Image (cartoon, rainbow, N blue to C red):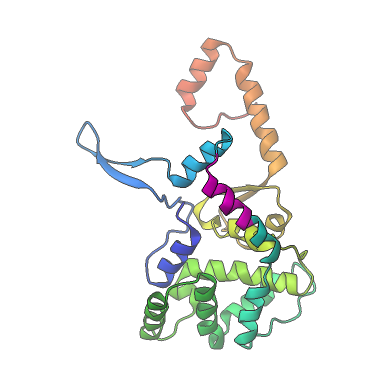
Amino acid sequence: NWDYREVCLQSLLGSRVAMTGQILPEDMEEVTDVDGSRAYLLEPGPGNRAIMRWARKRFVEGERIAAKRLRGEAKTLGITSMQKRLNRQLVVVPKVRSLAELPVVVGDLLDRPSLQRVWIAWLLEELEAPPDAREAVRRRWHAMGGPRLPDFAPYAAHCVRAFLLLVAGMQHGVLTARPSNRIDIEYLLYLPFCDVFVSADRLHDQLGPLLVRADQSIVKHDAFRADLQQRVAEREALDAGALSRREFAFGSYPWPLK
């Protein structure tokens, strides 16, 4: 999938970002099939190829240096910079006493007309957007009459909501304060581009349900793994004829479990 930073900036600049479960492929090429019809070829991108190399324990020196730097940043990043940016904008996050109160407080903050400009500026700082892009976003927002962020840039609003849930939750002790939270929250920024989200992370378990669409599912990692193991065992128990009939009937779709 395209990196959320690029997608978020394009959302602020006016690009339509589909948020109904489709992956936004980074490397896609339009080709002509043998029958003359158009098709799209998805090759593994640089990130995919790197992961395949890492699975074979093959690394290059530059990657080791980058990994060391990222590990160091993960220990110190936290949400301090996000809180400081809100403080500079004189934004006061109301007291949150429970996880159930968190979406209510954040929803109220996001809906305030006086703070719409703040959320855009806050997000542009988080994205480290270049000056020309920041100015283009501001001009577009003013030209549209200063609309609410969800109307102006729906995907950007999703990102701001996720960041605010994290900041408010950690600031008032509803979420465990861990430096890795700032990195872990980024997985939830890709929720609009999937139908099923699988994780064993506690932060995802707490905030994921507050960010999903009505037609999405969040599945516990252990349950997902157990389901896969059951399907593998059932497949391996079939003889060649039964396996052939199943594959003919279902193709690449998961088989119904007995």
User: What's the residue at 35%, 84% (across, down)?
Assistant: 143
Measured from the top left, where is residue 235 in percent x and y?
60, 21
Asked if residue 88 is positioned above or below residue 183 in the image, the reply reads below
- Number of callouts in the render? 0
Q: Residue furthest front?
A: 61
Magenta segment: does it hold 65?
yes
Quadrant location of the C terminus?
Answer: top right
Asked if residue 227 is positioned above or below residue 239 in the image, the reply reads below
Measured from the top left, where is residue 137 in percent x and y?
40, 78
Q: Which residues are magenta?
A: 59-70
Q: Which is more toward the observer, 92 or 105?
A: 92
User: What's the residue at 66%, 66% (across, down)?
Assistant: 77
Asked if residue 90 is positioned above or below residue 248 in the image, the reply reads below
User: What's the residue at 56%, 33% (across, down)?
Assistant: 56
Measured from the top left, where is residue 37 in percent x and y?
23, 38
Classify residue 104 by image quadrant.
Answer: bottom right
Q: Which is more toward the observer, 107 or 176?
A: 176
Q: Main secondary structure of the magenta part?
A: helix
Q: Is residue 5 left or right of residue 14?
A: right
Q: Is residue 106 visible?
A: no
Measured from the top left, where is residue 68 in percent x and y?
63, 53
